[in-house]
Amino acid sequence: ETVLFNYGWFLSFAGRHADAIAMAERGVALRPTLANPHRNLGVAHGYAGNAADAAKAMRDCIGLDARVTICHIYLAFALLRQGEADAAAAELAAAEKLFGANPTPATLSSVAHGYYRAGRGEDAARLFARVQKIAADGGVVGAGSWPLGYLAIGDADQAYAWLTRAVEKVERGEPDEGFFNLMIIKANVAANPVLDEPGFRALRERIGKL
């Protein structure tokens, strides 16, 4: 299961979405009663921009195990793409309840951005403030996590500056704790129009370029 997910994620990262979906579908066929294969399929569809298919897979995942945080987050992303802001906000709130005491900055940033896209500015700012506190307290916040955080508070200039740094890190082959957030940005899974502006689009095209 882990091998299938990692390889499928690599295929998505490389832009081979049909192959990634096929890999995830294979995982579901092998283990249809487990939640995670449906999670993997939902992520693959989400990166491919298939909102309806992503939502179905994530609902299947939640139906099997409602404790899988990422399924609530990616279901929210799919709902945002379908214009269902209130339903998306409810899924983000469900994800928050599953965070535990120490959610990662990457998770906080991605959910903050989701709240912003759902029109929940106060919730977005609240979660991004937690990311900023982690950094202020000496914690590690990956370069890839800052762009979503700044987008969550409507600061496109800082988001662009941090995305530039994150992309340059990837191009140098350096690891980054916010790496998975870069895929959220690359695929624009929450359909943020700012990320479709020319400067941001040029940076997104550099993420995962082989």
Image (cartoon, rainbow, N blue to C red):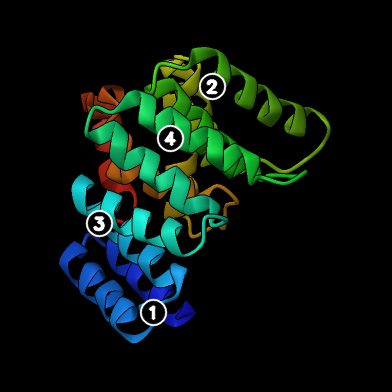
Mark in front: 3 vs 4: 3
Q: Residue furthest left?
A: 18
Position of residue 129 relative to residue 57, above or below, is above
Q: Helix, strand or loop at disc 3? A: helix
Q: Helix, strand or loop at disc 2? A: helix
Q: Measuring from the top left, give residue 41's x and y in whole percent.
A: 31, 65
Q: Which residue is mark 3?
A: 45
Q: Earlier in the sequence, mark 3 or mark 4?
A: 3
Q: Which residue is mark 4?
A: 164
Q: Residue at x 41, y 17 (%)?
A: 156
Q: Earlier in the sequence, mark 1 or mark 2?
A: 1
Q: Helix, strand or loop at disc 4? A: helix
Q: Which residue is mark 1?
A: 4
Are dots 4 and 1 in contact, CB under 8 Å?
Answer: no
Q: Measuring from the top left, give residue 109's x and y in whole percent.
A: 55, 34
Q: Amino acid at mark 2?
A: Ala
Q: Residue at x 49, y 60 (%)?
A: 173
Q: Which residue is mark 2?
A: 124
Q: Amino acid at mark 1?
A: Leu
Q: Helix, strand or loop at disc 1? A: helix
C-alpha gap between disc 3 and disc 4: 26 Å
